[in-house]
Image (cartoon, helix red, strand yellow):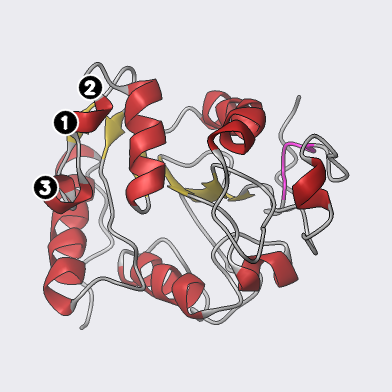
Amino acid sequence: MDANQQTRSNPFGMDEACTNCAALCETRKSLVHGYGDVGADFLFVGEMPDAGADETGVPFTGDERGEALQHILGLLGLNNSLPSSDEPELENVFVTYLTRCRHPERPPTDEEITTCEPYLNAEIRMINPEILVPVGERALEAIATEYTTTPADEIKMTDHHATTIRGRGFELVPMADPLEQNESEREAFLDHFESLMDSDYRQTKGRRGR
């Protein structure tokens, strides 16, 4: 499986007609694989496509939650387009989900997350990021279980939002749901992540305006 950076959308050419979860095939509009820079240091993982991503086929676009995350990425210098863009110009960041299809009436089941796991594992393996960012409690639970030695029940978003957790081959920086964050939580994440970028990656993006 090779990357095709001629496109940010599904650059690894994953199956765009997957039928592994019959119940989701009946409800989805799009099958939403990962999107972004295949050479990224930072990989953000949400739980499932929202209604916006289901429409656009691009993770974290098309609705308020997507715009909230894209706005944060812009403040960090990782998104060079408007938060409302359906095809954001992401640099040094890749965005994806635990599951690739949306059910409008419920979250994904554990079985559906397990079924989609090979897609996520392949993206992580191919990109080999430095930092994994689980977005929301369900993503944190899944990523912590797979990529840390700490029992997942000891890692809670209320305690670990905007902190760094050492993982197996990666560091994790959990992010609370961007649509539900208050201003203090957003500022905490921005400050922590920007400090991490400056110290570990010596980037020279400068301070953001707020």
Q: Secondary structure at mark 3?
A: helix
Q: Amino acid at mark 3?
A: Asp
Give the residue at mark 1: 154
Q: Does label 1 or label 3 sit earlier along the sequence?
A: 1
Residue stretch rendered in magenta on the structure: 10-14
Q: Amino acid at mark 2?
A: Pro
Residue 40 image point, x, y percent: 48, 42
| Badge 3 density bin: few <14, some 14–19, many ≥20, Cα 10 Å | few
Q: Quadrant of residue 42?
A: top left
10 is higher (above) or lower (below) than 86: above
CA–CA distance between discs 2 and 1?
A: 6 Å
Q: Does label 2 or label 3 sit earlier along the sequence?
A: 2
Determine contact: label 2, label 1, CB under 8 Å: yes
Observer-nearest residue: 108 or 100? 108
Q: Amino acid at mark 1?
A: Glu
CA–CA distance between discs 1 and 3?
A: 9 Å
* Labelled disc at residue 159: 3
Q: Secondary structure at mark 1?
A: helix
Residue 207 image point, x, y percent: 18, 70
The answer to whether residue 197 is magenta is no
Give the residue at mark 2: 151
Residue 160 image point, x, y percent: 15, 45
- Residue drawn at 75 percent across, 28 percent down: 2
- 28 vs 76, left or right, is right
